[in-house]
Image (spheres, grey):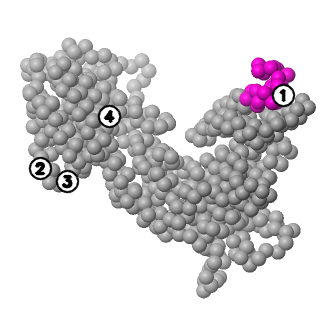
Amino acid sequence: MDLQGTKEARTQEDGDGPLDRSKEYHKERRDSHGHDSSANVHPLRRRQAPFAYPPGARLTASSARRDQSPSPEAIRIPQILGLSSRDQRLLCKARRYPPVTKKTLSELDLPCIMSNINLRMDANFDRDLHFKPDLDGEKGKRKRKEAADYWDSMASEIAIYAFQAAQPEPEGKTTRESFQRTFDPRLPAMFETLQEVIKTLVPERDHPSVMQNLEVPLLMQQVRKGVLDMVALATWMAALLKTHCAPMRDEWADRMVEQIAEGSQSQEPKEIVNGLQTLFAILEAMKLDVANHQIRTFRVLLIEDTVPFLQEYFEGKIQRGSFQVESARQWYIASRNKASEEDAAKSPTSQLEDNIKPLEALFRGISDQLLQFDPPDDFPETFLFDSDRLWQLRSTIQNLVNLDIAWYIFESYVHTQKRYLSSRDETYSTFRSRIWSLMEDGIDMDSRTGDVENDRNIRGSSCWLQNMRCIALEIARFACAACCLDIVVADEVISPIEAALEWHLSNESDLFCYFQRAMREKILTATLASARKYLPLSPLAICESQRSPPQPTAGPATATTGQLTPQQYDIERIGMRLAHMGVLHWRVWAPLLYLRDEIAEQEQEPAAFV
């Protein structure tokens, strides 16, 4: 299942139950534990031939017939219809069931929603969380092609039924060629699917009517004899669906009837298929409407139950040995030791601050990964269901550092020209808007594991360098405007700017490290300030607090105006987001892993930081 504004699905290991986001309606998540081990195995994958013929060997007619093994329901493809080789291939190879089935829609049922661990996590961070068909990326492209192939094959099948009804073939009149070209019909399965899906969407009182009007054997008998009144059937379905669907879907239902009526009148199978496509789109939309209403209804329960649900889930996986967390524990210990060393030279902290030191070590460790020059191989295993959010935060933070460097290069060039900025704040605001949009265009969250040379997120890759040249050109334009130079950017302007930008952003230079350290301190300050506010709050209260505008963190930059600059606003937002993730994460994993030994030793004492 897909969540707009988020995020994606994972297949559960045996014994874990239906705890994952639907694969039909959600983007795929990164998962280093093999949760997707079965997601890529298509249930209709073609069976390999049991015997490989030697090169040059030819299949005899009898061996070909044995290999085809047509079922009793198989239909011969009339050669007189002149179907193209593609149409004949689709009749034999396209999927047998429509893209929308009772099984795919069952992933949107309430029990699956309530046990969906990805959805529970995403509900905490996305107030407008809702399902939509997952048609993005390579997986979506494949699904669209499979659906198109299915409906194309259905159009050919309807044409064959119409031909056979008009010109019934005498019994016994079969040729070897026609016998070899057979396919299993899809229309009966489509009617069965239609009946099953509609019954899940309408009250039980309407089920007898559904069974009567969608009696598959009767419908198929009428199809074979050429007397099925598809227009009457479509009109009945439209009236039934309009009784139970949202008013916004009524137009779809009317369009479905019009398409089927036009196709029936013109004897055009493709137009009838267009109507059937619209019909199944209506059914899918109705199920999505119900599921999204249930998310809104149970949102509070999903959020408030997040911590105990995750603790029970992960504790069971750890006990079964299906989730390895020792590397995450070692990562936290290393982060805590590093934090202690950094604090050794500082003044002693108060008792209250001492109590959040274990949590602060977590934030320091994850901040280092968000800010490090080269992207980490992955985040600790315990952040399994937060990894997408962390990658998004890392991209934003890295762009903030890059923006600081770009502004520094711009100001440095202006100063070398003996110029000064008359309205620095206004210039920075425009500069930031233009450069930031170019940086955002260069982000592709789906290509992190792609080809290194062409990955636009990898520093130094060809795509990344191309984007840097676009940014350098924009900086040069700003420099020309600030220095009152020609509007056409000269080579002597862009060359030093491009060289400086590429050097400092392609290498872990002193300038990069300077802005990196400064950004780390700002983000940690904002994150810890938010974390202190969130610790006594419930998960729902923390979630609702994200709607409030960021408050200025005490500091010299905000003391004079009391307002946030654009960069400060972004940093405060990052701090709120990271603190939200961190506090929920801490409540789950502190007793399970990070502070497991300390809690075992002090079982009788309340842990103020948990």
Q: Which residue is mark 2?
A: 208
Q: Position of residue 521 (x, y in %)?
A: 77, 57
| Kind of residue at disc 4 | Arg
Which one is nearer the viewer's eye here, 494 or 398? 494
Circle on res. 483: 1
Q: Are marks 2 and 4 in contact (CB under 8 Å)?
A: no
Which one is nearer the viewer's eye here, 323 or 207? 207
**Distance in Å between CA atoms under marks 2 and 4:** 29 Å
Query: Is tag 4's residue or tag 3's residue first in the polypeptide sequence?
Result: 4
* Camera-nearest label, 1 or 3: 1
Q: Are marks 4 and 3 in contact (CB under 8 Å)?
A: no
| Kind of residue at disc 3 | Pro
Query: Is tag 4's residue or tag 1's residue first in the polypeptide sequence?
Result: 4
Q: Are marks 2 and 3 in contact (CB under 8 Å)?
A: no
Instruction: Tell me if residue 531 comes above or below residue 494 in the rendering.
Output: below
Q: Which residue is mark 4?
A: 95
Quadrant into which the C terminus falls: bottom right
**Distance in Å between CA atoms under marks 2 and 1:** 80 Å
| Kind of residue at disc 2 | Pro
Circle on res. 462: none
Left or right of residue 108: residue 178: left
Count neighbours of disc 3 (C-alpha within 10 A) and say few if under 14, some if 14 to 19, many if 20 or more: few
Count neighbours of disc 2 (C-alpha within 10 A) and say few if under 14, some if 14 to 19, many if 20 or more: few
Q: Which residue is mark 3?
A: 203
Residue extending furthest toward the bottom: 604
Q: Residue at x 23, y 27 (%)?
A: 259
Which one is nearer the viewer's eye here, 367 or 154? 367
- The magenta segment is 473-499
Q: Is 59 in the magenta?
A: no
* Camera-nearest label, 2 or 1: 1
Query: Is tag 2's residue or tag 3's residue first in the polypeptide sequence?
Result: 3
